[in-house]
Amino acid sequence: MELNKYIEHTLLKQDATKNEVVKLLDEAKKYDFLGVCVNPVYTALASQYLKDTAIKVVTVIGFPLGQNTCEVKVLETIDAVKNGADEIDMVLNVGKLKDGEFEYIVDEISKIKTACQGKALKVILETDLLTQDEIKKACELCIQGGADFVKTSTGFVKNGVGAKAEDVKLMFDTVSTAGLQVKASGGIRDREAALKMIEAGAVRLGTSSGVKIVS
């Protein structure tokens, strides 16, 4: 199995430097990863650096809390696309989900999908904070909003586990018939974990351990 073609090589830490981002991009080229995932401030750099490759540039919106206003998330998305993002990973507003404000969530996803201008939209559910019923409901709302992927985690929840195979399977079972796909991210640090996520239904793996996994 070509695991490199599942991996979005990721660097989203708060203190990431330009040199560290360039190292990530060089590694993505060397190992021919499917994509890279970087913070918005480095989207233009990544897009320019990878312009002669097939490697996708992914960036994050409303990251990591998802609690920005919808209008701000839309503006972030427009800016990201302008800067060369191939795909957008937005953070779901978990508070609105728990409050039962489902129309708000569908509307927000729909508006951000429009702002993507045809680029793929992934919605980060933050599964560590959700029950199984809430994960399923969130997936249903993502279908209604027109998202392309559902994604497990930001990796920023304190004491969080991140991606769990049973959550990935639940997400896959809920969205696959509607044509959406699943990205597993958070805590995927070795080949065994990566294979478990793929077996559960993930077609993308967001990880900062991509080199270790494929090596």
Image: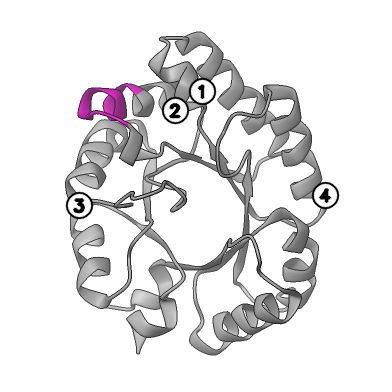
Image quarter hosting the C terminus = bottom left
Pointer 4: what residue?
82
Q: Residue at x 50, y 33 (%)?
A: 147
Residues tagged 2 and 1 counted as in contact (Cβ below 8 A): yes
Q: Distance between the Cα atoms at labels 4 and 2?
A: 24 Å
Compared with residue 15, is residue 27 higher up or lower down, i.e. above or below?
below
Given the image, on which type of amino acid does mark 3 rest? Answer: Ala
Nearer the camera: disc 3 or disc 4? 3
Given the image, on which type of amino acid does mark 2 rest? Answer: Cys
Q: How many marks?
A: 4
> Seen in the image, is 179 located left or right of residue 109?
left
Pointer 3: what residue?
165
First in residue order: circle 2 vs circle 3: 2
> Seen in the image, is 185 located left or right of residue 1?
right
Image quarter hosting the N terminus = bottom left
Compared with residue 23, is residue 100 higher up or lower down, i.e. above or below?
above
Picture coordinates of residue 13 (x, y %)? 58, 62
Given the image, on which type of amino acid does mark 4 rest? Answer: Lys
Q: Which residues are magenta?
A: 130-137
Nearer the camera: disc 2 or disc 3? 3
Pointer 1: what residue?
145
Q: Distance between the Cα atoms at labels 4 and 1?
A: 22 Å
Picture coordinates of residue 198 (x, y %)? 25, 60
Picture coordinates of residue 174 (x, y %)? 26, 31
First in residue order: circle 3 vs circle 4: 4
Q: Residue at x 79, y 34 (%)?
A: 75
First in residue order: circle 4 vs circle 1: 4
Residues tagged 4 and 1 counted as in contact (Cβ below 8 A): no
Residue 142 image label: 2
